[in-house]
Amino acid sequence: VNAAMVITEYLASRRSLIDRTLDAHLPPAATPPTAIHEAMRYAVLGGGKRIRPTLAIAAAEACGAEVEPLLVSFAALELIHTYSLVHDDLPALDDDDLRGGRKTTHVVFGEAIGILTGDALLTEAFSWLARPAAGADAQLRALREVAEAVDSKGMIGGQVADLEGSIDTAPTLEQLEFIHRNKTAKLITASVMLGGILANAPASQLDVLREYGQATGLLFQIIDDLLDQEQTTEALGKTAGKDAAQRKLTYPALIGVAAAHARADELLRLAETRAAMIRGPVNYLGAIARYVCERRS
Ligand code: IPE
Ligand code: IPE
Ligand code: MG
Ligand code: MG
Ligand code: MG
């Protein structure tokens, strides 16, 4: 069997576990008021790579855990990610009307419901994370890890810096790395950590997982920047070329396409090295980092 097939099958199988969990645990569309529940389900169940919960599953597996009891906690990561995209696409932020090959949530349901859908998904996520799944100490630690990743010193801070940044205002590499580490890498790192924490991994393994997550997270956003420039709208399912049109501060814009690919390769090597330090029975962490680097959408 060829190695690329193996990771493809792994990703597909974990994605279907996550899709099933999301569908089963999101409030039914008929729940009143139906507008918000239809919008939440529309935003979450429209596809997506499910890379954050997949990373949590892969980390937990690499640390030797049985993942079935942890799936609701891991699926909560996708609710937070989806909320961040629904808000990212709003007219006041990136103003996008296409996501996952479909109209964005605010275009279909209106801007007010779009805003409230993000609020509802974020709140729902913490409700799912608070459901009994592992030991109480591990869950409290996990809750704090995820909350801190997406607060104003994490993902929201990154989104603010992204809005404030521009390729036209003499940006520095430090400013760019701050944006990417906060808006994207922190939630990805927290996803890896959620898997390790709920698997009761020892501190030494959690340290390695954190370094793996930080490298994979920054890698993820550098590739997102490159894809925006190198791929078509059809391939991405979201509007290509938006970053250049909006004068966004991105890796290819600041250091050029070739240097951005070189930085991505360097981060992939770091992620693979850290992944190889976790000696569990099933370890797809290195293969996932490679997929993140080589993906086409
Ligand atoms: C897009 O994330 C937003 C970023 C943080 C770059 P993904 O590329 O994970 O989006 P989906 O969920 O697969 O559509
Ligand atoms: C989104 O970054 C980051 C978050 C939503 C936190 P982008 O704005 O680059 O994501 P896309 O390209 O719209 O998916
Ligand atoms: Mg954005
Ligand atoms: Mg955007
Ligand atoms: Mg982007």
Image: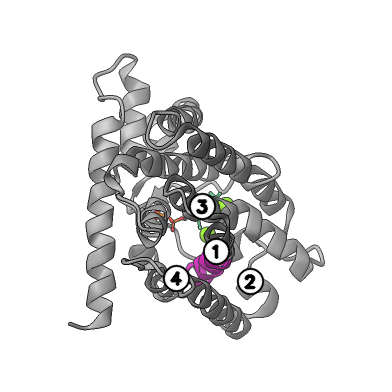
Q: How far apart are marks 2 and 1 (CA)?
A: 9 Å
Residue 193: image tag: 3
Residues drawn in magenta: 215-229
Residue under label 4: 289
Earlier-in-chain disc, 4 versus 1: 1
Earlier-in-chain disc, 4 versus 2: 2
Earlier-in-chain disc, 4 versus 3: 3
Q: How far apart are marks 4 and 1 (CA)?
A: 12 Å
Q: What element carries label 3?
A: helix
- Front tag of 4 and 3: 3
Residue drawn at x 26%, y 65% is 10
Identity of the residue furthest to the top in this view: 32
Q: How far apart are marks 3 and 1 (CA)?
A: 18 Å
Instruction: Mark 2 and mark 1 in contact? Answer it, CB < 8 Å.
Output: yes
Residue under label 2: 251
Q: Is residue 216 above or below residue 125?
A: below
Q: What element carries label 4?
A: helix
Q: Does the residue labelled 1 lie within 8 Å of ligand 1?
A: yes
